[in-house]
Amino acid sequence: MSKDVITIVILLSVVIWFAVSREALKPSSEIKWRKMIVLLSAGSLSTLMITISLFQSLPF
């Protein structure tokens, strides 16, 4: 992937994980679980994409 795409994915990942942390700070009766699951899935996928691209750029 190009550096521009990775930069965008990194920025989106930061925003997603920030939203996850804000949702997790709410009392459990106010947490919207569907939103939490979607955010966690998107955050995990973006983190996986970043990790794979970083490993691919390592010289062996």
Image (cartoon, rainbow, N blue to C red):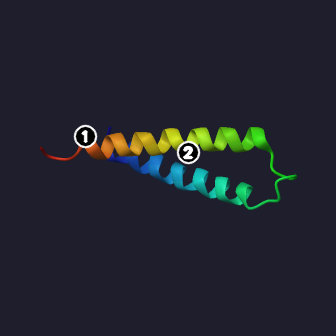
Secondary structure under tag 2 reads helix
Q: Nearer the viewer, residue 29 or 52?
A: 29
| Quarter of image, res 1 | top left
- Tally of numbered tags: 2
Secondary structure under tag 1 reads helix
Judge from the rendering whether residue 27 lies leftward or rightward of residue 8; answer left or right.
Answer: right
Image disc number at residue 43: 2
Q: Residue furthest right?
A: 29
- Which residue: 65% across, 43% down? 39
Judge from the rendering whether residue 20 lies leftward or rightward of residue 7; answer left or right.
Answer: right
- Three-letter code, disc 2: Gly
- Which residue: 20% across, 47% down? 58
- Determine which residue is flagged by label 1: 56
Separation of marks 1 and 2 at Cα, in angstroms = 20 Å
Q: Residue furthest front?
A: 28
Q: In x, y percent, where is residue 44?
A: 52, 42
- Three-letter code, disc 1: Gln
Q: In x, y percent, where is residue 27?
A: 83, 59
Q: Residues within 10 Å of mark 1 (few under 14, many from 20)?
A: few
Is 31 located above or below residue 41 in the figure?
A: below
